[in-house]
Amino acid sequence: MHRLLKKEQILTIPNLLSLVRLAMIPVIVWLYCKKEAYLAAVAMIVLSGLTDIADGIIARKCNMVSDFGKILDPVADKLTQAALILCLATRYQLMIPLIIEFALREAAMLAMGYAAIKKKDTINSSQWFGKLTTAMMYAVTSLLILLPNIPLWCANAMIVFCGVTMLVSFVMYALFYKGFFSGRKEARI
């Protein structure tokens, strides 16, 4: 764990972008809940998403991938997603089961990630299906914020779609970690 706390592992451009994303969360919540400035809230979500993409590209292209960043980046993603889901739960009742699914999924993912650190001294990067789930969550929550008068059946269909996407992603991560812990090559899905 000491390798995570080295200055060169923390003070990188990708990690600073992740910290910017964390700082954007209260602004997004304030814009949505307090100001009801939906367009501005979505603009902040898009900016957050663009910094997420940028930090990954910079980390890989400039050889700035760090174990600290492998933890910080998904934490920023998950906290942003949690904030968006909680904000939308004030408007859409079907968000409540999604909150529960999200919390259970993330608790299980945290346990699997912790086990990987303890057993194999490895911090795994997010997989393509996790990134796809994040993109879908951002897209759906942004649409629900941007279109507050969308028909309820349409909103509910998008929420169910997010729930199914999260479930499929979780199953794929479970298979990934099963292969990872067994040492099989198919750990990369």
Image (tube, rainbow, N blue to C red):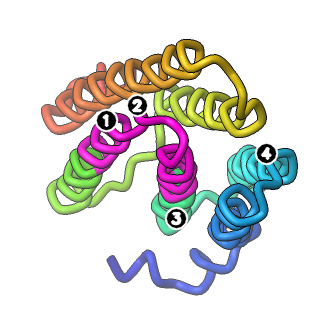
Judging by the rendered image, the residue that carries numbered circle 2 is 94
Judging by the rendered image, the residue that carries numbered circle 1 is 97
Look at label 2 and name its amino acid.
Leu
The N terminus lies in quadrant: bottom left
Judging by the rendered image, the residue that carries numbered circle 3 is 72
Disc 2 crowd rating (10 Å Cα; few below 14, some 14-19, many 20+) is some
**Bounds of the magenta span?**
78-106
Look at label 1 and name its amino acid.
Pro
Is residue 86 visible in the rendered image? The answer is yes
Disc 1 crowd rating (10 Å Cα; few below 14, some 14-19, many 20+) is some
Dominant SS of magenta comes to helix
Q: Classify residue 15 by image quadrant.
A: bottom right
Q: Earlier in the sequence, mark 2 or mark 4?
A: 4
Judging by the rendered image, the residue that carries numbered circle 4 is 42
Give the spatial CA distance, label 1 vs label 3.
Answer: 26 Å
Q: Earlier in the sequence, mark 1 or mark 4?
A: 4
Tell which tag, 3 or 2, sits nearer the viewer: 2
Q: Name the spot of residue 88 as percent of width and height, x first.
A: 55, 44
Give the spatial CA distance, label 1 vs label 4.
Answer: 23 Å
SS for callout 3? helix
